[in-house]
């Protein structure tokens, strides 16, 4: 231990002095005001960026009753993608490898075995082309993989290979396995590749890639076609976001009023939190919002008046708009965001069925739906596996991973 008791107490006292400057007692009431008065609709730069689907309201359901209710969808499928994390090698290559897996409730062992694997490589030598357009089948036909050459960039190489690997593996696996989904597919994360769509705000070089290079655009097109496939089949597609970092609402509110929350998740948590007479959080019920249409932040490109970064949409553009609702589980003080394309939530019956299914799952699992948790377990690459894969790739490349002092200090590279 590097902190003596006197140091520990000194740090705590400093924090106490900071907290005395922050009065959060009115944050809850102000969150209620924003919810009731700002979101029907929320305007930003002359656009309706947030508006309710149906009636604006906050609801609650007894957690035990929610967990015991019958599932509106007899079967559920979850899908997730995991990576080894971007790795730089001494031969100038930057690599990330992602695998995507789908899980079923009830279980389907053959489906669980299947994988889509994408290795994305960036070379600092612009003349090197490592990409392969064809997919290679392995594991007796259960799985397939391909190599993707990342577009050349002068910075953000790791972000580029990570996003392309993660999202191409995910959308490819979802489209490949779409026919096995009869009732409901839940993506672990947003319904669109927001890590790619966020490039428009990160740096001009990445923003140019997004609209000029076919590789990231092809990935986004895959998600658009996934929505079209499920809409044509009448099978709902949703995304379960465990850690939403969106600040679009708080940014828009801040244009008119103060917005004391770090992000939108903190705002909705305040708006949905219930307290007793002593100010303690009540934990008997899950609380949740109505559904909203979102046309701000990274949701803007797929809005009805967005350009979808040049991707052609076969259906009415309004069908692709992001809609969402928020669930607050006070038992662990967790807030989740559930997304779905508007084509599925426009119908009140379908919208309510999705709402009740996700409430049931969160209440029962005290976290993500079982289908998502199982997919996460299948797709996750453990720290030990990442280290072993790193050593195997070093041998194949005949080059070592580019190590730094922090790698040795913190044991990041085995």
Image (cartoon, rainbow, N blue to C red):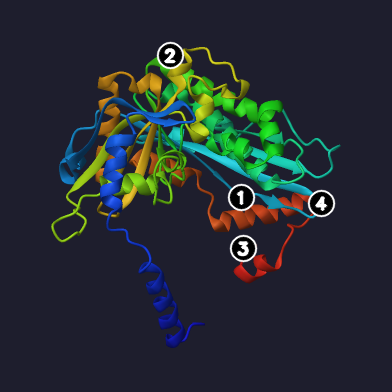
- Which residue is depicted at the point 43% across and 76% down? 14
* Residue 94 spot, x, y in % from top left: 73, 47
Is label 4 in contact with label 2 (beta carbons under 8 Å)? no
Q: Nearer the viewer, residue 286 or 161?
A: 286
Q: Which mark is residue 91?
A: 4
Kindly indicate the quadrant of the structure image that contains residue 49: top left
Circle 2 — which element?
Answer: helix
| Label total for image | 4
Give the residue number, with chain letter if any, for mark 1.
Answer: 85
> Which residue sits furthest left?
277
Give the residue number, with chain letter if any, for mark 3.
Answer: 412
Mark closer to the chain start, 3 or 1 = 1
Q: Nearer the viewer, residue 311 or 414?
A: 311
* Residue 77 spot, x, y in % from top left: 39, 32
Query: In the displayed structure, does residue 362 sit left or right of residue 398?
Result: left
Mark closer to the chain start, 4 or 3 = 4
Gap in angstroms between the C-alphas marked 3 and 1:
11 Å
Q: Nearer the viewer, residue 117 or 27?
A: 27
Is label 3 in contact with label 2 (beta carbons under 8 Å)? no
Label 3, residues with CA under 10 Å away: few <14, some 14-19, many ≥20: few
Q: Nearer the viewer, residue 376 or 409?
A: 409
Label 1, residues with CA under 10 Å away: few <14, some 14-19, many ≥20: some
- Which residue is depicted at the point 37% across and 49% down? 266
Mark closer to the chain start, 3 or 2 = 2
Circle 3 — which element?
Answer: loop
- Which residue is depicted at the point 29% across and 22% down? 350
Give the residue number, with chain letter if any, for mark 2.
Answer: 232
Is label 4 in contact with label 3 (beta carbons under 8 Å)? no
């Amino acid at each position: 231990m590097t902190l003596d008791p006197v140091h520990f107490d000194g740090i705590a006292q400093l924090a106490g002095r900071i907290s005395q400057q922050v009065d959060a007692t009115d944050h809850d009431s102000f969150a209620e005001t924003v919810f009731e008065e700002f979101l029907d609709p929320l305007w930003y730069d002359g656009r309706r960026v947030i508006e309710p689907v149906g009636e604006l309201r906050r609801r609650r359901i007894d957690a035990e009753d929610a967990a015991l209710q019958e599932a509106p969808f007899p079967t559920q499928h979850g899908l997730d993608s995991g990576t080894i994390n971007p790795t730089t090698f001494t031969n100038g290559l930057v690599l990330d490898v992602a695998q995507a897996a789908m899980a079923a409730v009830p279980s389907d062992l053959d489906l669980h075995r299947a994988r889509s694997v994408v290795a994305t490589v960036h070379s600092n030598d612009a003349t090197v082309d490592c990409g392969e357009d064809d997919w290679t089948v392995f594991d007796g036909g259960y799985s397939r993989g391909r190599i993707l050459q990342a577009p050349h960039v002068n910075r953000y190489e790791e972000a580029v290979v990570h996003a392309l690997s993660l999202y191409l593996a995910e959308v490819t696996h979802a489209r490949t396995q779409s026919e096995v989904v009869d009732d409901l597919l839940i993506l672990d994360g947003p319904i669109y590749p927001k890590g790619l769509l966020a490039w428009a705000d990160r740096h001009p070089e990445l923003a140019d890639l997004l609209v000029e290079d076919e590789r990231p655009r092809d990935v986004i097109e895959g998600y658009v076609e996934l929505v079209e496939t499920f809409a044509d089949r009448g099978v709902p597609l949703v995304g379960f976001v465990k850690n939403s970092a969106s600040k679009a609402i708080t940014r828009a509110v801040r244009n008119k009023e103060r917005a004391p929350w770090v992000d939108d998740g903190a705002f909705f948590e305040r708006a949905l939190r219930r307290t007793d007479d002593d100010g303690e959080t009540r934990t008997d019920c899950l609380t949740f919002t109505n559904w909203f249409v979102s046309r701000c932040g990274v949701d803007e490109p797929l809005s009805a008046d967005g350009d979808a970064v040049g991707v052609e949409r076969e259906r009415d553009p309004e069908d692709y708009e992001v809609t969402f609702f928020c669930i607050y589980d006070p038992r662990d003080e967790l807030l989740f965001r559930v997304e779905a394309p508007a084509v599925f939530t426009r119908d009140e019956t379908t919208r309510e069925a999705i709402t009740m299914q996700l409430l049931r799952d969160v209440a029962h699992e005290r976290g993500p739906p079982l289908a998502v948790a199982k997919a996460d377990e299948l797709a996750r690459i453990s720290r030990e596996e990442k280290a072993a894969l790193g050593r195997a790739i070093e041998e194949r490349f005949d080059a070592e991973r580019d190590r730094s002092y922090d790698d040795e200090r913190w044991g990041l590279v085995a």
